[in-house]
Amino acid sequence: MTLTRRQTLASALGATAALSMPARLFAQSGPILHASWGGGVGDTWTVAFAGPYTADTGTAVRIVELPNPEAQFRAHAGDPQYHTGIGTFVQGVNMMRDDMLETFSLDEIPNMRNIDEKYWLKTEDGRIAGVTPYFAYYGIAVNTNEASVEDFQSWKSVADPKWKGRLGMTRPIYLSTYDLTILAKAAGDDEYDTAGGMELLKGMARNVLNVSNSLAQQNTMLERGEVAAMPFYSVRVWSLNEAGVDYVKILIPEEGALLLPYVIFAPKGVKDRGMVADWLNHIASAAPQERGAALSGYIPANRDAVATSEIKAKLGGEYDDLRARLYQPDWGYIAENQKDIVAAIDQMLATL
């Protein structure tokens, strides 16, 4: 019998109904508390990761949906309220540099051996500070009722004056890490020299209808055709397509798209450290990452993960083929310079 996504979610959520108990009770009774972003991300973690782990080990995992897990980790530094949480790679780098993360040896998380080391969040002495379970990518989303996919075969297209008032754009905090980085590459530079990227970003800003404050707003802008296109996340377009919005497409321009690794980390001083290490090792394995790909279009980090024919059709090829078209910048450098970059973007936008 084939189950729909809704039925699959309902089944998994029903199987983990006991996990809806208050967080403080869980912290006392032992189940793992995992801080996640909400919406589809929380659903994916319940179905693809937490539910199967509980079934296999008998250890309950509660997915706690939060607007920003990093903020909670920082607010409770020294008194962890969660065992693990998700963040962007830049967030992980910043917390690691602030000595806020628990670290693990490779022997404690052996499945990391099947993840390319360039995707590891690790300390200078090689200890693991975070597990990368999967990637998304940052490309150009196009509403094909408003524009043609051929119109955006290059990142430079977003600066074309013909799109004045027809593009969407995110906030400077994300422009600094994502948009500027890939636009710099399109200009022939990189994250270390972003002058050309800043000029393209300025051109895009002149074409923007408005700067969106949330992913939900960006989804709406694209779905309703309020904008013809905007830089956007592959998994968000995947969700739109799965919901029947097939006229919104995600493109990888000729210069490539930006690879976005996500990371799962544990706060320094986390309780039940051995249990947490086992949970992280499960996250690093191929099977849950394959389930995450089927549910939400995430690209597995574990090299043993196999793409089904359906996944290959939706992604346009094997996982390795897709990774080859994605640009992996120096996230450590970007994180270290983020404040200055945000300030420069704010100043640029103020002059328009």
Image: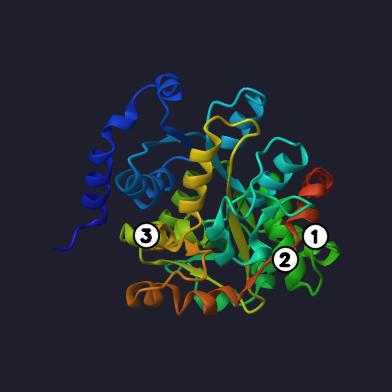
In this view, 152 is above or below 86: below
Tell me the quarter of the image containing the N terminus.
bottom left
> Dot 1, crowdedness within 10 Å: few (<14), some or many (≥20)?
many
Res. 139 visible in picture: no
**For the residues carrying marks 1 and 3, which lies nearer the camera in this image?**
3
As helix, strand or loop, the secondary structure at mark 1 comes to helix
The CA distance from mark 1 to mark 2 is 8 Å
**Amino acid under disc 3:** Arg
Does residue 191 appear left or right of residue 95 in this picture? right
Q: Helix, strand or loop at disc 3?
A: helix
Asked whether disc 1 touches disc 2, contact meaning CB atoms under 8 Å apart, the reply is: yes
Nearer the camera: disc 3 or disc 2: 3
| Alpha carbon separation for disc pair 1 and 3 | 38 Å
Name which residue type carries label 1: Met
Q: Which residue lies furthest to the front in this view?
A: 107
Which mark sits nearer the N-terminus, 3 or 2?
A: 2
- Pointer 3: what residue? 291
Residue furthest out toward the left: 1
Residue 71 in which image quadrant = top right
Residue plotted at (29% across, 46% down): 55
Q: Where is residue 332 in the image (x, y as percent from the top left)?
A: 77, 54
Q: Is residue 192 visible?
A: yes
Count residues near mark 2 (Cα–Cα under 10 Å), then give few for <14, some for 14-19, many for 20+.
many
Q: What residue is drawn where x is 75% and y is 50%?
A: 123
- Going from the N terminus, do you reach mark 1 or mark 3 first? 1
Compare residues 263 and 122 and report the one nearer the observer. 122
Q: Which mark is residue 183?
A: 2
Marker disc for residue 198: 1
